[in-house]
């Protein structure tokens, strides 16, 4: 599976270009199923999850071409040969369930295996299914698959209230509503930047969507949508990860291709802990000027502190002066990195969904295991700042969400190699 070997204690210096967003591109690939015309997605990140989603839509009959030179994906779903997303492909990534909305909208039927992804807690798809049912779909759940059909092969617009502002459910329901009859209103919708990026792409295709980025999204159904070209937004979680690594190692780096507005929660916490952050257009400069001060963090849906940055800031807090308290409100099993950080000497106590971290001057390198994507990123950050050598195992989790992370870190002066 591979591992990263990190010799810590080297500050990061220089500049790095942030890749396109993993969490934005996956629903956009799925949305390409809505049209018979070719869609072009530009500046794709070289991630295992992107490869997996391309394999999935290809398996459904879409023609998928990847141009390695331009880093563009060309997708044409004119001849869909099936409506079943098999377990072998779906089990690899959670976002695979996002094909259900486009399949229902275009083909009037969909059969999708229950999804996989990181084992960070129960992420039920009941919000997706309630929304589809409200739009007239008939749902059958059994034998590891969820099957949905639309009477008359057409969904009906309606008002849907989400019990929780789920990003995945919001994305799935938006794409389903694009070709539905009449108007669909999604209330208590997720407002993450990735939702706005999806709506922007769909609007280029001819969809009629308003309110993306707020808690109420309105979609007026159209008869068909066209092909479109789209450049994916920068990855705010990759940017936050590199900001945290630079701050903790006492480095001085500039991140290019970022949207500072998307990074406000992370920026606020790093500044609160004593770090210097300078925003300039589409770049952010991060300077680690002292040992960090302790932090209190509570994860929330956007615009709150992102759950996808919780593990990284947990590792950061291990080096802080004082006691940090981190509360995870989104996923009940997102402290799996704690035991690995303890192997490096971290002083962490977990009580339910709260982690209490007693900061120490430094951690000691050790052999640790990436249990999920963001936990892996946290361990890399800890290894960069720790004394001695850290070996991070099971880095296939990290490859799902970070494009050549070791190459970018090496160019910033980190002593890290893949074995």
Image: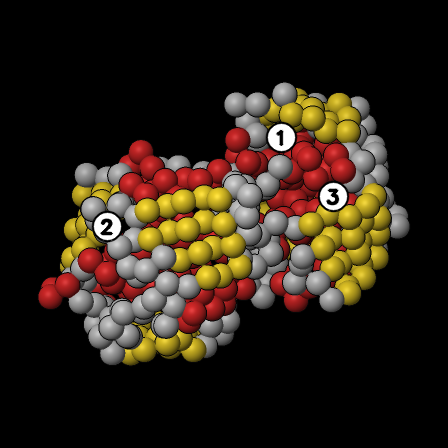
Nearer the viewer's eye, disc 2 or disc 1?
Answer: 2
Q: Quadrant of residue 406?
A: top right
Query: What SS does tag 1 mark?
Result: helix
Residue extending farthest left = 152
Residue extending farthest right = 289
Which residue occupies 50% across, 64% down? 197
Image position, residue 7 (x, y; %): 77, 26
Nearer the viewer's eye, disc 1 or disc 3?
Answer: 3
Query: What SS does tag 2 mark?
Result: loop
The one of 352 and 370 positioned closer to us in this rendering: 370
Q: Quadrant of residue 107?
A: bottom left
Q: Crowding at label 3, few (<14), some or many (≥20) Cα neighbours within 10 Å? A: many
Residue at label 1?
340
Q: Which mark is residue 80?
A: 2
Q: CA–CA distance between discs 2 and 1?
A: 45 Å
Q: CA–CA distance between discs 1 and 3?
A: 18 Å
For marks 2 and 1 on the same chain, the one whose residue lies earlier in the sequence? 2
Label 2–label 3 contact, CB within 8 A: no
Is 239 positioned to the left or the right of 63 in the image? right
For marks 2 and 3 on the same chain, the one whose residue lies earlier in the sequence? 2
For marks 1 and 3 on the same chain, the one whose residue lies earlier in the sequence? 3
Is 26 positioned to the left or the right of 329 in the image? left
Image position, residue 312 (x, y; %): 65, 44
Residue at label 3?
245
Which residue occupies 34% across, 49% down? 97
The one of 65 and 377 positioned closer to us in this rendering: 65
Q: How is the image coloured?
A: secondary structure
- Visible in this render: residue 27? no
Image position, residue 223 (x, y; %): 24, 73
Asked if residue 87 is positioned above or below residue 255 in the image, the reply reads above
């Amino acid at each position: 599976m591979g591992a990263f070997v990190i010799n810590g204690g080297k500050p990061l210096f220089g500049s790095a270009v942030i890749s396109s967003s993993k969490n934005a591109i996956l629903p956009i690939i799925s949305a390409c199923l809505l049209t018979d015309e070719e869609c072009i997605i530009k500046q794709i990140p070289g991630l295992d999850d992107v490869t997996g989603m391309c394999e999935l839509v290809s398996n459904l009959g879409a023609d998928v071409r990847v141009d390695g030179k331009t880093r563009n994906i060309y997708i044409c779903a004119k001849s869909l040969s099936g409506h079943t997303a098999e377990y072998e492909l779906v089990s690899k990534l959670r976002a695979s369930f996002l094909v259900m909305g486009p399949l229902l909208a275009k083909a009037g039927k969909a059969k999708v295996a229950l999804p996989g992804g990181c084992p960070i807690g129960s992420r039920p798809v009941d919000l997706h299914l309630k929304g589809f049912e409200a739009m007239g779909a008939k749902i059958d759940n059994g034998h590891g698959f969820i099957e949905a059909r639309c009477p008359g092969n057409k969904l009906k617009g309606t008002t849907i209230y989400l019990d929780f502002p789920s990003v995945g459910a919001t994305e799935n329901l938006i794409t389903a509503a694009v070709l539905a009859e009449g108007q669909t209103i999604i209330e208590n919708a997720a407002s993450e930047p990735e939702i706005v990026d999806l709506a922007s792409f769909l609007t280029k295709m001819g969809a009629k969507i308003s309110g993306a980025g707020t808690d109420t999204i309105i979609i007026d159904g159209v008869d068909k949508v066209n092909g479109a070209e789209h450049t994916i937004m920068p990855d705010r979680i990759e940017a936050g990860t590199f900001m945290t690594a630079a701050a903790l190692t006492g480095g001085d780096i500039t991140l290019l291709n970022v949207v500072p507005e998307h990074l406000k929660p992370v920026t606020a916490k790093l500044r609160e802990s004593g770090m210097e952050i300078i925003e300039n257009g589409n770049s952010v400069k991060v300077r680690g000027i002292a040992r960090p001060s302790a932090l209190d963090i509570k994860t929330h849906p956007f615009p709150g502190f992102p759950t996808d940055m919780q593990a990284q800031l947990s590792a950061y807090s291990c080096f802080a002066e004082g006691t940090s308290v981190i509360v995870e409100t989104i996923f009940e099993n997102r402290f799996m990195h704690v035991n690995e950080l303890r192997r490096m000497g971290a002083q962490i106590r977990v009580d339910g969904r709260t982690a209490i971290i007693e900061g120490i001057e430094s951690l000691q390198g050790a052999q640790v295991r990436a249990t999920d994507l963001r936990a892996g990123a946290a361990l890399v950050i800890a290894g960069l700042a720790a004394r001695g050598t850290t070996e991070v195992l099971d880095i296939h989790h990290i490859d799902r969400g970070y494009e050549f992370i070791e190459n970018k870190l090496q160019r910033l002066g980190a002593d890290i190699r893949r074995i």
